[in-house]
Amino acid sequence: MTLDSPKLGCTDSPVRHERGQKAVFCGLTGIVWLHRKMQDAFFLVVGSRTCAHLLQAAAGVMIFAEPRFGTAVLEEQDLAGLADANAELDREVARLLERRPDIRQLFLVGSCPSEVIKLDLERAAERLNAHHAPHVRVYAYSGSGLDTTFTQGEDTCLAAMVPTLKPTEAEELLVVGALPDVVEDQCASLLSQLGIPSVRFLPARRSDAAPAVGPNTRFILAQPFLGDTAAALERRGAKRITAPFPFGEEGTTLWLKAVADVYGVSAETFEAVTAAPRARAKKALAAHRGTLEGRSLFLFPDSQLEIPLARFLARECGMVPTEVGTPFLHRAIMAPELALLPAAASLTEGQDLEAQIDRHTAINPDLTVCGLGLANPLEAQGHATKWAIELVFTPIHFYEQAGDLAGLFSRPLRRRALLAGGSAA
Ligand code: SF4
């Protein structure tokens, strides 16, 4: 006899799969936050002037602060096959490493042009590694718009690092996903208070702190867009702990609980460690609930954070998700989130921009989460918008950031109310 209990939330909901015109970033943008996290790394995009302009625009003011990223621009003679692009790349890399002896990890980042002319950056990385090791480790990954959307650039980057991590038999917990240092410190402190013996992070702040991996490694994702990295870790024998993502009070508690259960942490210890930060998070969230409660929400696909954020905004802030778009839906990684998302939400994977804008117009939501390209036009039409890119640049994970996360969504609504001369409830 089997018990056929109904599935929760959106687990069994149909997903609209769309292909067509897209308004999303390519994976090169991941460099903007990855280079801040990995303090001895340099990201060298092998691409065109378009790629250089994109990085310049996305990184904004940071380009003046001797950044650790740049573009090796493919000129017309490279594209026409008149020059040996590999020889030029070797020369550029040698020049760069001579000028910047502080660099210990160099990432060659593939772009649309480098892929179209079939420049084999993996082979180039091997060749350069042989030349510059052990002082510098050279990796290659793709951030091109042909293969990657926005945050997927972090996934391809971390997945490229996994095969080079040292092997180990040690029982360690690996937290995977680039978190701002202050958030990483909070996460490490909570896990250590729970008594988790050995916790490492991928990516590490510096190459000499890189984690090792092996059959006794357990890992948990801190970001939802890391499918390739998870698969690469599993190929090394590591086992994944499944959990919702640590957004909001509930998400953080469920994430920590999933770890605590695997390590046999007692219910009393768990309660003692989490009670105070949970109460703080709930109090901080309450300040925004009045603005957000009952308001409808529409998310265009951008970062793969959409489903966890819709879950957080629905369950902890009382918002009503209408359409939740995601550039890519990884069923296994997203299963705990889908179970918690209100069943009335409609899910879309991929994008057909015109059709999606028509649906958006028909729904006329109170708040729209979208990329910069759509934000101002939608604002001009009278819609309140939240720029999705801020969600990857701002500390939003774990208990202490729960209030700030809700604030990112309540702010555009308050601003509209203020500009309209009404109350900013
Ligand atoms: S990688 Fe492709 S999509 Fe990204 S900036 Fe370069 S040309 Fe544009």
Image (spheres, rainbow, N blue to C red):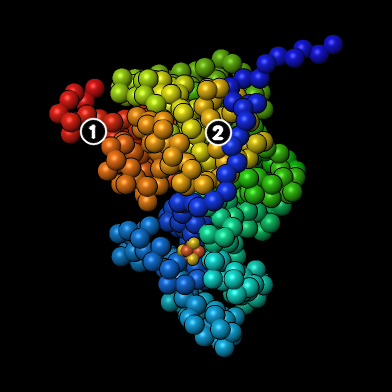
Q: Residue furthest bottom?
A: 82
Element carrying mark 2: strand
The amino acid pointed to by label 1 is: Arg
User: Where, by quadrant of the figure, is residue 425 drawn?
Assistant: top left
Residue 157's disc is none
The residue that appears at 60% across and 65% down in the rendered structure is 140
Figure label count: 2
Q: Nearer the viewer, residue 63 or 131?
A: 63
Q: Position of residue 373 (x, y in %)?
A: 37, 51
Residue 290 position, x and y percent, is 31, 19
Cβ atoms under marks 1 and 2 closer than 8 Å? no
Disc 1 designates what residue?
416
Describe the element under mark 1 as helix, strand or loop: helix
Q: Quadrant of residue 218?
A: top right
Q: Is residue 18 above or below residue 78?
A: above
Q: Residues within 10 Å of mark 2 (few under 14, many from 20)?
A: many
Label 2 CB less than 8 angstroms from ligand 1: no
Q: Residues within 10 Å of mark 1 (few under 14, many from 20)?
A: some
Which residue is at a point 59% across and 26% down the rendered structure image? 10
Mark earlier in primary sequence (1, 2): 2
Query: Residue at (43%, 27%) from the top-left corner?
Result: 313
Label 2 sits on residue: 347
Q: Kindly report the distance in space between the C-alpha atoms of the residues bearing marks 1 and 2.
A: 28 Å
Residue 128's spot in the image, x, y percent?
61, 75
Viewer can see residue 102: no
* Nearer the observer, 168 or 296: 296
Answer with left or right where residue 102 lies relative to residue 414. Answer: right
* Residue nearer the viewer, 323 or 86: 323
